[in-house]
Each structure stands twice: as C-alpha cells, then as structure tokens.
C-alpha cells in the first residue's frame, strides 16, 4: 500500500474534535473527541443526561458547539445549517418519528430522495426534459428502497395509518433515499417490542453491509448496541468515559460505575 493509500485508509470519515456545549451554566458536553471510520457501526451510550442527544444534535447541526470542531472527510461541518447536511452525505432519523403523517409512504421517501437532487423550483415547474429524466430516476430510487426495506405493499398508504414500527422503517427509508454516507440514528429501538428490536439490529447491519453506510447509533437498548456496534463511545456528565470494542467498554470499571450510579439500571 502506497503512502497516499495508507493516509486515506487511516483518515476518519467523521471526526469529533474536542467538542464542548454549554447551555447557560450547564456543561452538556466537555471536550469530547472521537473518530468514526468508514463502514463502522458506532454506538454512543451513557446514562441519562450524559450528553448523547446534545452530541447527536451537534452532528445533525441543530446545536452549535461552544468549542471544538466536527469534520466530515476533513472539512468542518459547523457552518452548515441542518437542512444542508444531506448534501454532504449525513442522514438522520428522529427519536419520535418525524414524517409527513398525511402523505403516503412513497411521497415521504421521495422527499428524502429530493434532498440529494440538484433540481430547482423553476426547472421543476417548467418540467424541463432533464428534470423529467431526474424524476424517473428519482421514482426508481424510491421504489428500490421501498423494496429493500420491504415497504412496497404499503407504498401508497398514508403514513398516519401505519403501526409505529412500520413508520420507523419508513423514516429509515426516507433517510436512505438521500444516499447518506453516514446515518445518524436517534434511539431507533425506542417503542419497539423484542422481536422488532432484533429485526432492527439485523436491518442496520444489512444496511451497513449492502449499502456501505456508516452508522452512528444513540441508543439506550444495551443489547442492541452491544450486538451490532463495532465500536462504542461511552459518555458520562458530558465527558468521554471510555471507547473501544463493545466487550471492552462493557467491562470498563468506570462505565460499570456510571451505570450502577444511574437510574438506567
Ligand atoms: P437521555 O439519555 O436522558 O436522553 P442524554 O445523554 O441524551 O440523556 P442530553 O439530553 O444531551 O443527555 O443532556 C446533557 C445535559 O445537558 C443534561 O444535563 C441536560 O439537562 C442538559 N441539556 C440538554 N439540552 C438542554 C437544553 N436545550 N437547555 C439546557 N440544558 C440542556
């Protein structure tokens, strides 16, 4: 392997560099750093109030760090507003599902796919030939994702009529339709039953393997994190407590102490 290749192989897809977030007097994150490598499933864990959501919101650009930087493929993302992170390959799902509940599954996923297209309102309205070609390609992409996530039977169903577990899959489909390099999943197991959590774990792994998507998973369901993550970062009181393989983090004395002292156990 040449020097350039070695450097490329080692440079992270996403780098969280010394990130701090202060709300009024509360330090929600305190100098947190870690890297995400291409193709990794990274689990972000920690007891209630540890700072997981705050970090997630920095990555999805809803919060601005008070200090530090977040770099995607070497370039800072901190000047980017939330609606422009899909363009650089960051996709996300929401803890409580944030779909257009009165639209069909197909249309919701199509909106996700639009996040990555370069068409503008004027060209769309004039239905220029290039735009029509884009539309055909876009619809085909949506259909492929619906098939992939076994949602084809409900493609034309209005989202609000679907069970919560299916809505979560639609949200995943919408995020995937923008062809993200990194998928940020905010407590995807929340509200799911045992079988659904198991199936979700399988699905996340399949998405990573089949579609080369790197995954950051914020999750309270320790069984899910430990069974699918390649790498785990544990936070407590806004600081990084430990990071490493699931087995190493699970047996880390500081992590055990943090969880024993929290309401999570
Ligand atoms: P949980 O598992 O309970 O969701 P968490 O690990 O996601 O917790 P955060 O929600 O990031 O933790 O909270 C970290 C700290 O920052 C907490 O002390 C919390 O009260 C505080 N905090 C979070 N968001 C805000 C906000 N918008 N304004 C003020 N304080 C906040």
Image (tube, grey):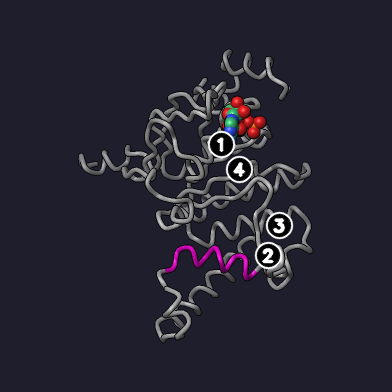
**Which residue position holds label 4?**
186
Circle 3: is it few (<14), some (14-19), or many (20+) Cα within 10 Å? many
Residue 167's disc is 3
If you read the primary sequence from the N terminus, does the residue marked by circle 4 or circle 2 appear first? 2
- Mark 1 vs ligand 1: CB under 8 Å? no
Q: CA distance from mark 3 to mark 4?
A: 14 Å
Range drawn in magenta: 106-117
Residue 34's disc is none
If you read the primary sequence from the N terminus, does the residue marked by circle 2 or circle 1 appear first? 2
If you read the primary sequence from the N terminus, does the residue marked by circle 2 or circle 3 appear first? 2
Contact (CB < 8 A) between labels 4 and 2? no
- Mark 4 vs ligand 1: CB under 8 Å? no
Quarter of the rendering containing residue 154 = bottom right
Q: CA distance from mark 2 to mark 1?
A: 25 Å
Q: Secondary structure at mark 4?
A: strand
Q: CA distance from mark 3 to mark 1?
A: 23 Å
Callout in the foreground (4, 2):
4
Most frequent secondary structure within the magenta stretch = helix
Is 165 situated left or right of 78 in this image? Answer: right
């Amino acid at each position: 392997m040449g020097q350039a290749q070695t450097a490329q192989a080692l440079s992270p897809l996403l780098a969280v560099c010394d990130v701090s977030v202060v709300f009024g007097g509360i330090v929600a994150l305190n100098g947190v750093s870690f890297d995400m490598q291409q193709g990794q499933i990274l689990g972000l864990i920690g007891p209630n109030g540890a700072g997981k959501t705050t970090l997630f919101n920095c990555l999805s650009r809803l919060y601005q760090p008070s200090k530090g930087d977040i770099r995607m493929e070497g370039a800072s993302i901190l000047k980017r507003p939330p609606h422009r992170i899909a363009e650089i390959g960051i996709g996300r799902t929401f803890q409580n599902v944030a779909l257009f509940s009165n639209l069909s599954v197909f249309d919701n996923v199509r909106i996700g796919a639009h996040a990555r297209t370069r068409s503008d309102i004027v060209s769309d309205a004039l239905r220029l030939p290039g735009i029509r070609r884009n539309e055909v390609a876009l619809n085909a992409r949506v259909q492929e994702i619906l098939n992939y996530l076994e949602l084809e039977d409900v493609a034309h169903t209005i989202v609000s009529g679907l069970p919560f577990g299916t809505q979560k899959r639609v949200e995943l489909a919408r995020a995937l339709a923008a062809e993200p390099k990194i998928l940020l999943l905010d407590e995807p197991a929340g509200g799911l039953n045992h079988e659904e959590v198991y199936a979700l774990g399988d699905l996340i792994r399949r998405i990573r393997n089949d579609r080369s998507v790197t995954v950051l998973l914020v999750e309270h369901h320790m069984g899910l994190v430990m069974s699918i993550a390649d790498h785990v970062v544990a936070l407590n009181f806004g600081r990084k407590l430990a990071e490493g393989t699931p087995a190493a983090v699970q047996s880390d004395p500081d992590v055990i102490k943090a969880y024993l002292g929290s309401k999570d156990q």
